[in-house]
């Protein structure tokens, strides 16, 4: 017959096991859905912001409300339910992206500062989490406090991944393809390091951050037109396809239970015994990424300054029309072509030229922003209005014309 002590231990064991189901086990399916969610977060926010003409603020409010509701349901449940958990990941990926976009586009917060800001917030979250709970294990989310720390960390990883990814892909002009290759290589490096003995929790959170720009690169490749090196699926089709992929994978996991954490995997004691050198590993990994990120940043900045200095002399000797951002004639030409198409009511041609304009602008962001960040931001804001008006599901000719005319004025005097 079991003693009272043994019965209590057994009950506690069962309760802990049930509680751990609030968070899925990290398998290949976890990372597949994570990347899919990240890509959907990128494309869905663009679809709501631009195509449905919600605007950045309107999209942020809608997504914020939905996220609060979804998180309330997640906290209310007593076990891990795949549909609810991954719905929260999708919504938090969209909202995390929007947080960074609002700081950058609405408040003029440089991506360099956003990257540092969210890095600090994430480190503080981890520090307080560990101070309070003595563990950062993703296998031990069995209290409300730990779950709150978990979702706060997830939010900051998306915001940080957005800021860092956009900084290198857009502000430094590397492009999403090059940035995606670099991130994929770093993810592979971390996976190898984990196999060689790197702490699993440390590897998990580093890779979790990096999958955000990786998913954005994938989304950019899929949505970009074939002319510009993409597959030309567009934001709407990509969002639908990836959402269906998420639904299919989540349903598979819900039926097979392959992502349920077992009691053995949920042991804090196991983690404690294996974490003797974790602090040293954290320091080494942090230094590696700091040196690589800062070194790469300043190296790229020098390249951009070299490109600017090599063209400054020629630019200053040409006729007037060279602005603080240099020669913007290609953007003026495209803007005028879009306006001509809108005047004729030819929305198909207008959308095609808008895609060309967006690609040209994004490809030139690095050198243009390095030349004059304030002027670049002014033009970028005018461009966003054009993108929203022309790409709206039900475009209005008058408002589109007004946005384009304003853009032409801004391009003439940024």
Image (tube, rainbow, N blue to C red):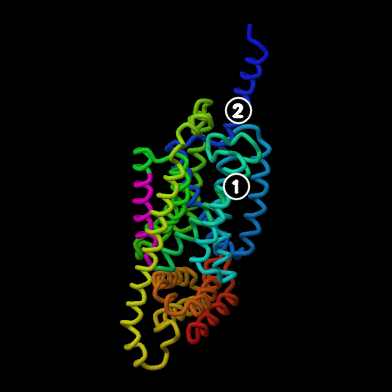
Write down the residue under mark 2: 16
For residue 76, the mark is: none
In the rendered image, is residue 130 in sight? yes
The crowding category of the residue bearing disc 2, from other C-alpha atoms within 10 Å (few below 14, some 14 to 19, many at least 20), is: some
Q: Nearer the viewer, residue 35 or 149?
A: 149
Whether tag 1 and tag 2 are in contact, CB under 8 A, the answer is no
Residue drawn at (35%, 68%) of the image: 299
Give the residue furthest to the top: 1
Which quarter of the picture shows residue 145? top right
- Which secondary structure type mostly characterizes the magenta part of the structure? helix
Write down the residue under mark 1: 128
Q: Nearer the viewer, mark 1 or mark 2?
A: 1
Q: Nearer the viewer, residue 186 or 86?
A: 186
Which quarter of the picture shows residue 353? bottom left
Query: What SS does tag 2 mark?
Result: helix
Residue range in magenta is: 173-190
Report the side of 166 relative to 121 (left or right).
Answer: left
The crowding category of the residue bearing disc 1, from other C-alpha atoms within 10 Å (few below 14, some 14 to 19, many at least 20), is: few
Q: Quadrant of the N terminus?
A: top right
Residue drawn at (51%, 61%) of the image: 116
């Amino acid at each position: 017959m079991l003693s009272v002590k043994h019965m209590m231990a057994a009950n506690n064991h069962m309760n802990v096991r049930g509680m751990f189901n609030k968070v899925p086990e990290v398998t290949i399916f976890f990372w597949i859905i994570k990347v899919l969610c990240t890509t959907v977060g990128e494309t869905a926010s663009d679809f709501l912001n631009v195509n449905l003409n919600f605007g950045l603020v309107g999209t942020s409010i809608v997504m914020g409300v939905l996220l609060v509701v979804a998180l309330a349901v997640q906290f209310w449940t007593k076990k891990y339910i795949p549909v609810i958990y991954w719905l929260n990941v999708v919504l938090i990926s969209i909202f995390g992206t929007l947080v960074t976009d609002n700081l950058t586009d609405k408040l003029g917060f440089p991506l360099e500062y956003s990257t540092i800001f969210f890095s600090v917030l994430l480190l503080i979250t981890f520090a307080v989490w560990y101070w309070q709970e003595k563990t950062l294990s993703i296998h031990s989310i069995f209290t409300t406090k730990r779950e709150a720390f978990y979702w706060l960390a997830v939010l900051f990883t998306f915001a940080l991944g957005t800021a860092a990814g956009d900084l290198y892909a857009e502000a430094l002009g590397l492009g999403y393809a090059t940035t995606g290759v670099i991130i994929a290589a770093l993810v592979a490096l971390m996976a190898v390091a984990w196999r060689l003995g790197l702490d699993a929790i440390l590897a998990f959170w580093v890779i979790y951050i990096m999958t955000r720009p990786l998913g954005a690169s994938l989304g950019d490749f899929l949505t970009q037109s074939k002319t510009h090196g993409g597959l030309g699926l567009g934001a709407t089709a990509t969002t639908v396809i990836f959402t269906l992929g998420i639904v299919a994978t989540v349903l598979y996991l819900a039926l097979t239970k392959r992502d349920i954490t077992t009691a053995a995997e949920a042991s804090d004691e196991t983690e404690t015994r294996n974490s003797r050198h974790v602090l040293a590993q954290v320091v080494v990994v942090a230094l590696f990424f700091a040196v690589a990120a800062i070194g790469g940043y300043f190296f790229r900045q020098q390249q951009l300054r070299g490109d600017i200095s090599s063209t400054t002399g020629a630019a200053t000797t040409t006729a007037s029309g060279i602005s603080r951002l240099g020669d913007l004639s290609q953007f003026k030409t495209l803007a005028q072509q879009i306006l001509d198409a809108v005047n004729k009511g030819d929305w198909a041609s207008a959308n095609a030229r808008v895609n060309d304009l967006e690609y040209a602008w994004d490809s030139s962001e690095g050198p243009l922003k390095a030349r004059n960040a304030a002027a670049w931001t002014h033009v970028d804001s005018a461009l966003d209005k054009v993108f929203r008006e022309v790409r709206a599901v039900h475009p209005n000719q008058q408002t589109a014309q007004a946005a384009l005319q304003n853009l032409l004025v801004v391009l003439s005097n940024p």
